[in-house]
Image: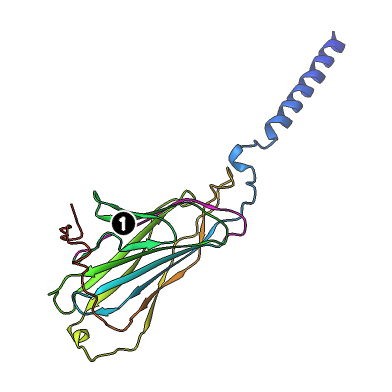
Amino acid sequence: MKRATFCMVVITIAILWAAGAVLARPAVHPQAMAAPTIPPIGVDIALISGPRRFCPSWTLYYTLRLTNTHETLSLTNLVITDVIPADTEVYPGDWGGTIPGAYDNAHQAVVWNAALVAPGEVVEAEIELHSFSGLPNGLVITNTFAYMADQFTEVHEISAGHIADEQACGATRTPTPTETATPTSTPTEAPTATATLTSQPSYTPTTTATVEPSPTATPSPAGLFLPLVVSNGIWP
């Protein structure tokens, strides 16, 4: 009887020891697993525009340049949007670039699309805006471009401002072109561990360059667009 009791005690101790070893083992959770190293997609963005000071009725020029700086990963479904600012208008054919753009009448904006931006590729979106005549001196026109892609977690923006200046209207005035750099930074987003093309981008601070060319007034192409009636950036 004592021998049987002794055996039961030994077996009980063994079971308790095994159970304690299992409970002491740290639990492995999926989120604790190390994520594979995925190189982030780097994007350089720059907005070149001018003139910085303009005579009312002059044409304002913009070129948005985006570069995929990643060595192997592509940027997919890139969308660039420019909502036409107040006190300006755009005519058909006044936009272009290396990727196709179209006018969105519902949002009074020009939208460019690129299904794929290959590693190292540079794309550009260009537009000309015609400022209204009779604008008050000192009025600032700010034009903002928004850009989005599958690899971004949010929409990003970059802007350029221009000042109405009556002194720029002098026919004999020939200002020296200048550049105004405005740092534009976007947050660094951690890459995900799920797919190659869905890693979050790491953005490099870029600059907005504003170039003031010779202020030669650009006449409105009335003869070319005679059938159109344009008001406040809208046409039928």
Q: Residue furthest top?
A: 1
User: What is the residue that sits farthest to the bottom in this orientation?
Assistant: 172
Asked if the magenta segment contains residue 71, the reply would be yes
Judge by depth and name the residue closer to the eye, 36 or 158: 158
Q: Residue furthest front?
A: 223
SS assignment at label 1? strand
- Give the image location of residue 133, x and y in percent: 15, 73
Q: Position of residue 159 (x, y in %)?
A: 34, 67
- When the figure is inspected, residue 97 is found, relative to residue 24, above or below; the finding is below
Quadrant in which residue 60 is drawn: bottom left
- Inspect the magenta stretch and tell me whether residue 119 lies in it: no
Q: Residue at x 57, y 58 (%)?
A: 119
- Identified at 18% across, 67% down, the residue is 222
Q: Is residue 174 left or right of residue 198?
A: left
Color theme of the render: rainbow
* Residue in view at x 58 percent, y 53 percent: 73
Q: Nearer the viewer, residue 125 or 144?
A: 125
> What span is colored magenta in the figure?
70-86
In this view, the residue in front, 161 or 202, is 161
* Residue 128 at x, y percent in the picture: 30, 67
* 74 lies left or right of 22: left
What is the number of callouts on the image? 1
Q: Residue furthest right?
A: 3
> Could you say where residue 187 lies in the image, as x and y percent from the top left?
46, 60
- Which residue carries the number 1 mark? 110
Where is 181 relative to 187, above or below? below
Residue type marked 1: Val
Residue 22's quadrant in the figure? top right
Name the image quarter holding the N terminus: top right
- Crowd rating for badge 1 (residues with CA inside 10 Å; few <14, some 14–19, many 20+): many
